[in-house]
Image: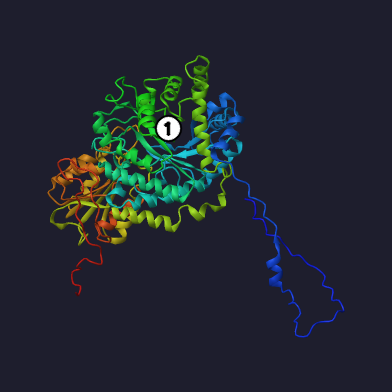
Amino acid sequence: MASAAHLSVLFLTGISLLAAVPVKRNVRPAPRKTSATKQKQAVARPSPAKPIPPTPEQVAAKWMADLSPRERAAQLIVVPFNGFTSKTRPKEYRTLVRLVQKEHIGGLILINVVNGRVAVKPSPRDVANFANRMQGMAKVPLLISGDLERGASMRVEATTVFPHAMALTASRDPDTARREGEITAREARALGIQWIFFPDADVNNNPDNPIINIRSFGENPDDVSAMVSAFIEGAHAAAPIMVTAKHFPGHGDTATDTHMNMATLSGDRARLEKVEWAPFRAAIRSGVDSLMSAHISVPSIDPSGSPATLSAKLMSGVLRDEMGFKGLLVTDALEMKGIANGFSTGEAAVRAVEAGVDVLLMPPDADVALDALMAAVRDGRLKQERLDDSARRILEAKARIGLDANKIVDVRRIPASVNTKENNLAAQEISDRSVTLVRNTGNLLPLADPRGTTFFILTESSRSHEGNAMKGEIKRRAPGAQIELLHAGMSDTQLTAAWERARNARQFVVAAFSSVSAYRGNVALSGSYPQLVQNLVATKKPVVLVALGNPYLLRSFPEVAAYLTTYSTVPPAEISAARALFGDIAVNGKLPITIPGQAAYMEGISLPGPALRTVVGSKP
């Protein structure tokens, strides 16, 4: 930034000559000119006018002029990276470098390699260094994006860990979403990520939804709208960042994982307007930068059966013409089977652009997608002007968040804004406020005396750190407690042995992890866990079930005496669950969803915190 011009002041000076002339009596000589007088007479030289910075439209126009028609088309393409380097994954690295340097693709998306259902995440420094390296190679700054649904922690280690979206709504306070938006935006920009694929605007009113579930803010469109708007406002207030509401036309009332197959959203136009589309309208009113499509057909709007991603009736007709959205339209990942099962890479790319989409996210083969776009122009199927419209919109978005001046991040400043004590305290407080007690037969909770209690912690993978935080919290509060930390890969023999060790317990606490995972197809308990829980219930001894993740688990185990849910599988949720079990925090969460046959929307039993509890033997 140019320094401010210094004000230069020029004083007019002169030489006073005293002539030898007679002076009349009683006539006082003229007063001497003081410095103040001189200042009054000073003539200020006008400061040079500051240059007016170019508008985003002007910056985009300059970039457009420097790009060939093919390069402008390449701006529509976003490809994945996971922090690999030329040493760790040389082939993938070379391909990415070529796409950035030679084809001039528009952006990148950070993904994770998954090993045994456990995401392998890069460090903040790795991500920032990689982003800087790619930006240095790019002719036009790259938009670097990520699915930061639980803060940056969803994709990057050693960043602030927030619980899943549904947990925030259980607190009944939109400020929790606003705070998450602020922290996520600041951490993302510090890492070199400028485009967040969140908030989730889906209304999860289908308990059997295998892929949205706790990623949604709940089943009530008003709740979802309020939380979506709060996140957007918080993010925009904190940093020059782009945020995305997803997955239009709404993925909440489906029972299909679109990573595996295309889903169908039933319901007439009136229902869609009232429920599914309300949060998207709220997002637009709040200034959301982009909307992500879903690979979902909506027969009441487009009888052709085309997925929304490829439907002009939905992308252009509803979003552009009816809702008046002027930001970026981005596809969900085109490598997902919801698209890839029915369309080739090239055909999907062309149809998406024909439908009105601006950004093609993760086509299975970026070269094939780009070639198909250019072939469609040559054949007259697409006009170059149509590709240019999207390219211009993308470039203006880049300029609007300052990428023309600030595409490189200072890696040395990461510790000042990422994973700070203040950020982590905020995330833990949000998690604590979300815990919901749905059932408490016999006032089992908080645990008055943990002696004779066996704690089962049912995790989903031996490779993850799931359960470690909760085990530590329990041991700290009940040093002699029997704790069985199990994982889904254990044999029936191992699970039976754990059951035998616990047979004589007075009561059981079962903390069960049940996460939402792509390509899994359900959110039920893993392996033989359901049978283990049924065996515990069959003893007729009290069973406390803690749902870490899927809050609908109570449907499968309606006989449990107490039911507590955190709506999340992250370590802060484990800590919150332990605190609630032992009465170390007040419990005031309310269900943002209905558990069919078991609990109603907004149900939740309140428990006082430690300061208000009556302790046996204490004095009033």
Task: From the top left corner, tell me how far across and down residue 355 is, in percent.
Answer: 41, 24
Quadrant in the picture for residue 224: top left
Task: From the top left corner, tell me how far across and down residue 310 is, in percent.
Answer: 38, 24
Q: Where's the C terminus, which quadrant?
A: bottom left
Q: Secondary structure at mark 1?
A: strand
Q: Is residue 556 above or below residue 182?
A: above
The colour scheme of the drawn protein is: rainbow
Q: Is residue 138 above or below residue 581?
A: above
Q: Residue furthest front?
A: 24
Q: Amino acid at mark 1?
A: Leu
Crowd band around label 1 with a 10 angstrom C-alpha radius: few (<14), some (14–19), many (20+):
many
Q: Residue furthest right?
A: 20
| Residue 505 can be seen, yes or no | no
Q: Nearer the viewer, residue 93 or 351?
A: 351
Q: Nearer the viewer, residue 81 or 139?
A: 139
Quick check: 294 left or right of 587? Answer: right
Q: Who's the residue at 31% across and 31% down the image? A: 257
Quick check: 466 left or right of 18? Answer: left
Q: Is residue 166 above or below residue 579?
A: above
Tell how many labels: 1
Q: Who's the residue at 55% across and 27% down the image? A: 72
Task: From the top left corner, tell me how far across and down residue 277 is, in percent.
Answer: 30, 35
Task: From the top left corner, tell me how far across and down residue 263 is, in percent.
Answer: 30, 27
| Residue 608 can be seen, yes or no | yes
For label 1, the residue is 329
Q: Who's the residue at 34% across and 22% down the image? A: 306
Q: Nearer the viewer, residue 271 or 219?
A: 271
Q: Residue furthest bottom?
A: 25
